[in-house]
Image (cartoon, rainbow, N blue to C red):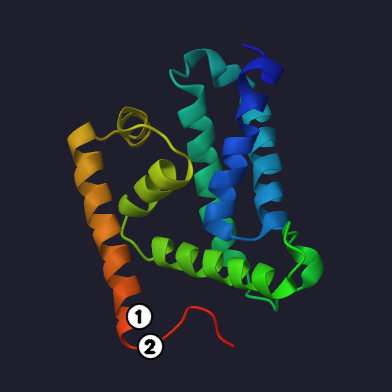
Amino acid sequence: MDFRTHILPHRDRLYRLALGIVVHTAEAEDIVQDTMLRAWERRDEWSGIRNIEAWLMQICRNMALDRKKKIVPADFSETEYKHPSTDLGAALDARESLSFLSQLISQLPPPQDDIVRLRDIEGLSYHEIADQLSLSETQVRVYLHRARQKLREQYQQLQNYGLSPIAH
């Protein structure tokens, strides 16, 4: 197995997973780099790994969750977030909405939080998610339904009370 051929092609998906957990671009980049380093350090195990992508995603997820516990919320800085929009207000709204959604997802119980990220953010199939999390496809579908229902309820609750995830 070759690092360039079998490990590096997964870095974009790892980045999206890490970003979905920690929300900060610099932190997500660091997590991906650390994941790649960990994979390289464990290269003697590669031949025994049945699904290299699932293995990498698990390493990345664990590192991101550990890093998230250590992140101290900081004030938003324009240089921290690069949004294609020239409207800074829209960029701030998008950033805060993403942060709010990420917070809602992180409040879901395991494995619902992982299933939402893998299905709705990463676009993995039910079969791939079941394989990665060692669940049946039926369990994945049930957990995903419950997670989406919970997210919908939380969002609806905010709308009913006139609250917005974005403080103005």
Determine which quarter of the picture holds residue 129.
Answer: top left
Q: Residue at x 47, y 19 (%)?
A: 49
Q: Is residue 33 above or below residue 69?
A: above
Q: Residue at x 47, y 46 (%)?
A: 121
Residue 77 in sight from this viewpoint: yes
> Which quadrant does the C terminus fall into?
bottom right
- In the picture provided, is 93 more to the left or to the right than 107? right
Please determine whether, in this image, residue 135 is positioned above or below residue 30.
Answer: above
Q: Which mark is residue 96?
A: none
Q: Could you say where residue 109 lies in the image, as x and y percent from the top left?
A: 31, 59
Instruction: Identify the residue shown where x is 24% and y is 60%.
Output: 149
Q: Is 69 displayed left or right of 108 in the figure?
A: right
Q: Quadrant of the N terminus?
A: top right
SS of the residue under disc 1: helix
Residue 138, position as x, y percentages in the image: 18, 36
Residue 84 appears at what percent x and percent y? 73, 56
Q: Does residue 136 show up?
A: no
Which amino acid, by three-letter code, is at mark 1? Answer: Gln
* Horizontal arrangement in the rendering, residue 15 relative to residue 86 (left or right): left
At 66% from the left and 42% from the top, the residue drawn is 32
Which residue appears farthest toward the right when viewing the image? 79
Which residue type does callout 2 highlight? Gly
Q: Which residue is mark 1?
A: 159
* Labelled pair 1, 2 in contact (Cβ < 8 Å): yes
How far apart are labels 1 and 2 at the CA level? 5 Å
Image position, residue 41 (x, y; %): 67, 29
In the rendered picture of this protein, how many numbered marks are placed on residues? 2
State the residue in front, 135 or 87: 87
Residue wearing tag 2: 162
Query: Are there few (<14), some (14-19), or many (20+) residues within 10 Å of tag 2?
Result: few
Query: Callout 1 environment at 10 Å: few (<14), some (14 to 19), or many (20+)?
Result: few
